[in-house]
Amino acid sequence: MDHSPADTGLTPDQLDHTAPTPLYHQIFLVLREKIRNGEFPANSVMPGEQELSKLFNVSRITVKRSLNELAAHDLVSRHRGRGTVVTASATLPQVHGSFDNLIESLKTMGLETEVEVLDITELGSPPAIAALLDVEAGTPVQRVVRLRKLAGEPFSYIVQFMPLDIAAGISRTDMETVPTLVSLERIGFAPHEAEQWITAVAAEPPVAAALEMAPGAPVLRVERVVRDKSGRGVQIIHANYRPDRFKYHMRSGRKAIGGWKSEG
């Protein structure tokens, strides 16, 4: 797909020459947003360096640095004679999570993605895991490693821990075809509440390899404990998400009398 200057939506006023952010990085951010929202679709040819330099009113060297940065983030591939092409993975859809509707969002995530079980083992529970599952440290638990894919591309690497009596009711086939939260309901341990911690970490080699990222690249880490109605911990997951595939959205508004309310 070729773009004329009129339909690119790119103009010099999208850049702030007084900002501390380098112009090449500002251009990178503008182009990245247009790729992610589909204005430059997968496999389409981006405007060339000369055209972009005119559209943004900057030097060709500045544009070249921007395009190289897009290539470094695997958003485009550059080909001599053909130009700069948007990669197929650049416009893959994202999974969006909601804080207020966490359980329902996770069910939906499971239904909209495919799962590959990489490993199932039993081990003595480390103290931190034991505390959340309400068992003594060293008590045998099941550890499952799964890779989730969206549109055929990896987006999360998940390590799950469960008490053995609960895990016994969920087969490997269930793990790959049925959302775990649904399986928990079916075997009498319906999720009632979830507590989670979110941070950013550097991808360890096994995680990076599974997610097709460079080792040490940043991933979104979500650690979650799910409890049933009695308050017992029935599932713990350590999920590593590709930041370009998974997004949490939260809006805050002041209540009538103090405090804050969050909504997805």
Image: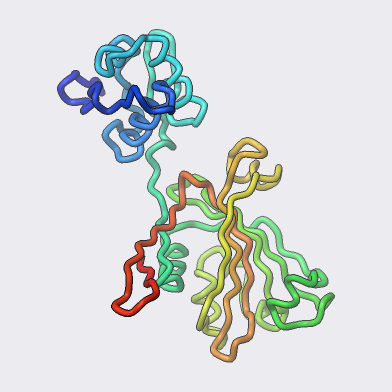
Residue 165's place in the image compared with 152, above or below, is below
Kindly identify the residue that appears in the image at 30 percent across and 40 percent down: 37
Q: Quadrant of the N terminus?
A: top left
Residue 204's place in the image compared with 141, above or below, is above
Residue 142 on image: x %, y %: 73, 71
From the viewer's perspective, is 105 left or right of 156? left
From the viewer's perspective, is 215 left or right of 59? right
Residue 136 on image: x %, y %: 80, 81
Q: Quadrant of the C terminus?
A: bottom left
From the viewer's perspective, is 213 left or right of 31? right
Return the residue nearer the eye: 72 or 27.
Answer: 27
Q: Hey, which quadrant is residue 63 in on the image?
A: top left
Residue 193's place in the image compared with 210, above or below, is below
Q: Residue furthest left?
A: 6
Q: Hey, which quadrant is residue 8 in on the image?
A: top left
Kindly identify the residue that appears in the image at 35 percent across and 62 percent down: 251
Total marks placed: 0
Residue 107 on image: x %, y %: 44, 69
Kindly identify the residue that appears in the image at 43 percent across and 48 percent down: 151
From the viewer's perspective, is 186 left or right of 33? right
Kindly identify the residue that appears in the image at 62 percent across and 66 percent down: 237
Residue 101 on image: x %, y %: 40, 72
Return the residue nearer the eye: 10 or 105.
Answer: 10
Identify the colour scheme used.
Answer: rainbow
